[in-house]
Image: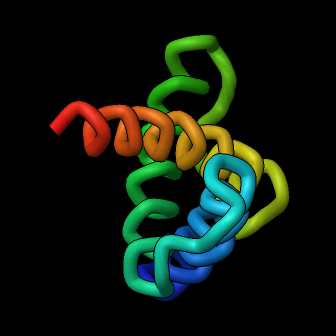
Amino acid sequence: MSILAWIVLGLIAGFIASKIVNKAGEGVGMDILLGIVGAIVGGFIFRLLGAHGVSGLNLYSLLVAVIGSVAFLLVYHAFRRAV
């Protein structure tokens, strides 16, 4: 995937995950970063379970990225509350 595709996927996945977890976006920059990290985390989780990770700019990859972003965001918020 190109850098632009990762940014677009990251923005969409991060925005959706932010809305799922805390009902408000984290800001455009943070949503992009969260989505890209979430795509990596989601790909890792899915590969551990025997499924495919992020494969391109498609709905399956978006689902993987959103699940990873939600998992990452839950850990992120738990860590921020603890500190």
Q: Quadrant of residue 44?
A: top left
**26 vs 29, nearest the viewer:** 26
**74 vs 4, nearest the viewer:** 74
User: Is 30 situated left or right of 56 in this image?
Assistant: left
User: Is 55 situated left or right of 45 in this image?
Assistant: right
Q: Quadrant of residue 3?
A: bottom left
Outermost left residue: 83
- Residue drawn at x 60%, y 26% is 46
Question: How is the protein colored in the picture?
Answer: rainbow
The image position of residue 36, as x and y in percent, is 44, 62
Q: How many marks?
A: 0
The image position of residue 18, as x and y in percent, is 61, 60
Up-down relation of residue 64 to residue 52 (above or below): below
Quarter placement of the C terminus: top left
Inspect this view and state whether residue 55 appears: no
Outermost right residue: 59
**41 vs 27, nearest the viewer:** 27
Up-down relation of residue 3 to residue 63 (above or below): below
- Residue drawn at x 70%, y 61% is 23
- Residue drawn at x 30%, y 39% is 81
The image position of residue 4, as x and y in percent, is 49, 87
Inspect this view and state whether residue 51 appears: yes
- Residue drawn at x 48%, y 82% is 27
**6 vs 69, nearest the viewer:** 69
